[in-house]
Image (tube, grey):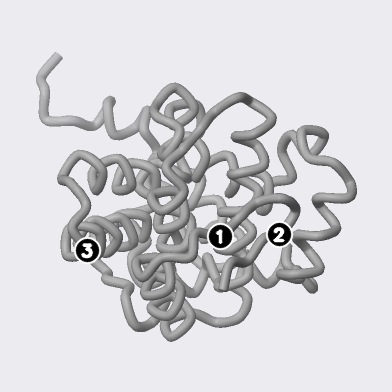
Amino acid sequence: MTETIAGITVPDTELVREATELVRAATSPLLFDHSRRVFLFGSLKGRHRGLEADPELLYVGAMFHDLGLTERHRRTDQRFEVDGADLARDFLLEHGRSASEARAVWLGIALHTTPGIANHLEPEIALVSAGVETDVLGFDLNEISDVDLKEVTVAHPRPNFKENILQAFNTGMKDRPDTTFGTMNDDVLAHFVPGFEREDFVEIIRGSDWPE
């Protein structure tokens, strides 16, 4: 059955249904609702900005983008974004999507916490970041009408979302602090992990093995 929220239609395909069930089984309601909002907000931002993405690819990018924070899918040897990107790439290839399509989704997920890059790339990449920036950071809310914002958040509520998502970030990253170097993710650990010390880019350069 076709589902439409705020004028955005969720694709009624086998691929989307399987992606939805995979994510629902792996995540808490917090992350599931957040991921659905990322798809919806990204689609609404795309409509406002004149960007047209393949809806299946955007859906998988949005739904898989935080799977690396979950107990079922997170690793400790790489960034959580790469965990989700790898899972999405493999899922799409297994469902007959091309390598280039799977790579676009991989990039959309891998770059979603790296500001200023994704918005210069294909819509399937750019709109994952746009959806995340809307839901987590509240960026450019003026691009979405109050009516559409309400419809999305009624369908997928965000109770105490700010603090709950910060705790989810911390839980998903605290066992791999080295992977947060050079990202905004180390802000989370600096707030919530006692004794966490950020790596200093300047001191790494000064202390490198190169002789002066």
Amino acid of disc 1:
Val
Q: Is mark 3 on a helix, strand or loop?
A: loop
Give x and y (percent) for residue 32: 56, 73
**Which of the marked residues, 1 or 2, is nearer the chain's N terminus?**
2
Depth check: give the residue in front, 23 or 53: 53
Q: In this view, does 73 lie above or below 119?
A: below
Q: Which residue is drawn at 24% across and 48% down?
A: 102
Q: Check residue 5 in the rendering and tell me which mark sits there, or answer none.
A: 2
Task: Judge by depth and name the residue closer to the eye, 13 or 122.
Answer: 13
Residue 100 position within the rendered picture, expressed as x and y whole percent measured from the top left:
20, 39
Q: In which quarter of the image is the C terminus?
A: top left
Q: Quadrant of residue 76?
A: bottom left
Amino acid marked by disc 3: His
Could you tell whether 211 is left or right of 151 in the image? left
- Residue beneath the point at 40% across and 68% down: 67
Mark 2: amino acid: Ile
Secondary structure of residue under mark 1: strand
User: Percent from the top left, x then y, of residue 47?
Assistant: 64, 34
Residue receiving disc 1: 10
CA gap, disc 2 and disc 3: 26 Å
Q: How crowded is mark 2: few (under 14 residues within 10 Å), some or many (20 or more)?
A: some
Residue in the picture at 38% in, 82% down? 71
